[in-house]
Amino acid sequence: MSIILEAIRQIFKSPITLKYPFEKTDVPKDFRGRPVWNMQKCVGCGLCSRVCPSGAIEMIGKGLKAEIKHYVDRCIFCGQCSESCPRNAITMTDEFEHAGYDREKMIYEYRRES
Amino acid sequence: MKTSRDLIAYNDLKKMIIEPGFCNLCGACEAACPVHALKIEDRSLKYTHDCTNFMEFCPICYDICPFTEALLLETLGFVSGAPNRTESIGYYRKIILAQAVDERMREISHSGGVITALLMHAIKTGFIDGAITSESEKETPIRIKPLLSLVPDDLLSAVDYEYFPSSVAKAFGRAVHEYGKTKIAFVGTPCHVRAIRKLEAWEHKIMNSLKIVIGLICLWSFSFPKLTKYLKEAYNIDASDILRIDLDKKYDVSMKDGRIISISIPEIEAHTLSVCKMCEDFTSELADISVGGAHPLKDWSIVIIRTEVGEEIFEDAVKANVIRTRKIEERPDVYAHFVEMGLLKKRYAAEEIERRKRCGEPVPPVYIRMLELLPREISLLSSLRAEHIMTREIIAVRPEYTVEDVLTLMTKHHHMGYPVLNERDELVGIVTFDDVSKVPASKRKETLVKDIAHKRLVTAYPNESAMAVYEKMSEHKIGRILVVDRRNPKKLLGIITKTDIMHVLRWPMRR
Amino acid sequence: MAERICGICSDAHTTCYTQAIEDLLGIEAPPRAKYIRVIIAELERIHSHSLWLGIAAHEIGFDTLFMYLWRDRETVMDMLEFISGNRVHYAMNTIGGVRRDIPSEMTPKIKDGLDFLEKRIKYYIKTISSDRTIQKRTVDVGILKPKDAIELCAVGPTLRASGVKNDVRRDDPYAAYDEIPFNVVTHDGCDVFARIIVRCEEMLESINMIRYALDHMPAGMLRVRVPMAVEPNEAVSRVEAPRGELIHYARSNGTARPERYKVRSPTLANIPALCKMLMGQHVADIPIVLAGIDPCFACMDRLALIDVNTGRKKILDFNSLRENIRRMRGNCP
């Protein structure tokens, strides 16, 4: 019956849960959120699209003219692309709220500004 | 040049570097290749699988090879913030003499133990968490392999010379990829330093973990099979018996049984790597700090600090009393020797490149580009004449002076040699510190200058080029030369010392 | 991708996968990486078991315990997040080693968390063994005799709760388990209560293992760089996932992608044992008996039909499967 004592004790404590959409915890240091491409650094080698386990990255064209299409709906946030990129052009951001109603809106495109 | 390049850089790398035999196995390409297609194994570079299976376009391995022309200007950007520049030393903030305070380190290293002390201190204070150096192989001590040190004591087995190729850039890649280190110090020869700087200029990811680059002073690296074969034939020594090789004006090969064999530079030159003969970087001009032996001083190193990071780590070590320093001005002879070696390497390189171009042999693209990029000071020396740089206010001695008088003069003026003029102001000889010091202290009062002075003199004429003067001095191994009138060789016009020539070499930046 | 097979035991799957591929390549992860793998695997075991314990409490209607357990489970989740950056899907393993280090600065914080967890788990064991509600709902419920358990190929805590000493970590040591001392927890109760106690004590065992691993972690490499392509070969690797023995099979054909890949998750192995367990039980006890094997239907719920002639692929999910069964049986509700 000791759990009942424990339960009574808890009544006087504040709740441990966070009121999520209003209160957010900080993400940890190496959190893997949505990957973002820095096209000024991208050399267009195509390695990220090649290593992506879920096929969420598409590269159109090659070399410095390459464009990247990132399908967030397919992304599993494993961080392999950012690890494979030889030039740190891909960074995993802190963004974690990707839920939405429309898959078409979950495509991010990146293009090198000349 | 970039436009005509292949989409996959390896094809170019193979054509320009690997096939002509310019690869020195630094392993930068292995560290950089995103698909691990290149691998250094058993002292050769292997292409393990076709990288086009994985990539559409990739410029990496060609761009970062230390012997290609790409990114050269960018690499200079890392050091060009320094206030001074000379041709023989490159950009620098300051040059000092230094040695490790710990006697143990001085013993292990053969020139002051500065790098060991510096890195050990840096690891202890947490400035770095790993250091890449080289260590001797057990069976053949002169053959070296990369060493990754994570705790200070590991560094004691590191060596501070690299006479044979060592894949340190590859080791750097491993430190990042396999050990997950984030603050790494890198120690390597000029070409390794260039590889690392190129990777940095390329903004390769692994370079986020680079903290500091320490360059070694390097004349040439040898081809291991060639040199050992030669030593076997000419001196009948086995490679495994050699303990180490020291370089001052010649190569001293120390054996395990204590013998030392001296080999002159021209004799050994044929057995160096072909790229090294064309290399003109003596002092690791792109490093944060360059360190090398301060010949003829034993137990001291010459330290060239080029960047702010370098200065920070060095000052920190000095403050913590692990390194003690001396001013380079205290020993102009050390500096002169150093500059001379630097210029010697550059001259050899220029000649070799010229010869190769004439014979239609391939030259690594980096050296061709380097010639276009860097301001030339050899040409500056050639454009000046002796009369421009000579000192006209001469302190001379009379033949009747005693040795003691000369010594008094020396302590007063700090010059190490004085021309001897007779009562008609005719030049009759020169007396130097070496001559004076041969006279025992008891006889200093009675010995006269005319008894010890050199009568045969090396002289120059006022309209000779500074370069010719400099070469004369190198040829006769003297520190000062007297400038005399062409029509009357007895009439002394001025004196040129090595210090004067060094002042000239600093001119471009002063203006 | 192997990490996405399961959200609870993601690390067990990656460990198993990387081991299979390392086997194919003929390389071995460096010692430090092995220790890190053990630490993550054991943290994951604690988190998985406490999650399960909460579920079990929920299934018998004891939601108070469920809430407390899940609150304390946050400690281990925070620890995993602290080490790897994410709460689940740690992405710590990579072929040839681990991606991130556990530097010595992290050790005190992890140990504090472990101390707290140890206190709480001991308290829960006391509560569970003394609480009448739990006793009544679990003792002598879902009996699985050792003989049946072996015959029906039960694995993991389900098997060990029937008194069979079987653990891949001990029988076929992988990672650094051969260097870390630990006991294989068994219980002779053969019922759901035994399964609860086995899991609780395994958590305590895990805490000790993590402490040992943190203290004895060798310095050195984290990973070895591996070639991209794999020579034709095949490999099987076994891992003791929180739920039991996990098997991965891989066959390579000389390219960068596997030719064939097969996963046998522990739940699949435990399902047949349910037949014996459920025999002669009250209907109201079915949830807790079912929960007793710690089922992970995500690990089971997949069936791909490939028409060999046309090459057409059809994956049946839960709904279509139910429809198919309905069609076959006629008019089942």
Image (cartoon, rainbow, N blue to C red):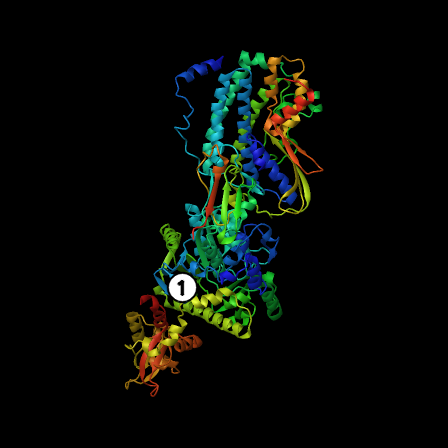
Mark 1 lies on a secondary structure that is strand
Q: Amino acid at mark 1?
A: Gly
Q: Nearer the viewer, residue A38 or C121?
A: A38
Q: Quadrant of residue C148?
A: top right
Q: Is residue B22 visible?
A: no
Q: Quadrant of residue B306?
A: bottom left
Residue at 72% x, 38% y is C309
Pinpoint residue C223: horizontal percent, then vertical percent.
55, 44
Pinpoint residue B242: horizontal percent, then vertical percent.
57, 62
Give the answer, above or below, for where C63 lies relative to C169: above
Q: Nearer the viewer, residue B392 or A29?
A: A29
Q: Is residue B202 visible?
A: yes
Give the answer, above or below, for where B24 lies relative to A81: below
Pinpoint residue A43: horizontal percent, then vertical percent.
49, 52
Give the answer, above or below, for where C88 lies relative to B287: above
Horizontally, residue B45 falls left or right of residue B493, namely: right
Horizontally, residue B443 falls left or right of residue B117, namely: left
Horizontally, residue C297 falls left or right of residue A41, namely: right
Residue wearing tag 1: B90
Q: Nearer the viewer, residue B280 or C206?
A: B280
Badge 1 local density, few (<14 within 10 Å), some, or many (20+)? Answer: many
Residue at 42% x, 18% y is A10
Give the answer, above or below, for where B396 lies relative to B141: below
Horizontally, residue B508 falls left or right of residue C274, namely: left
Q: Nearer the viewer, residue C192 or B60?
A: B60
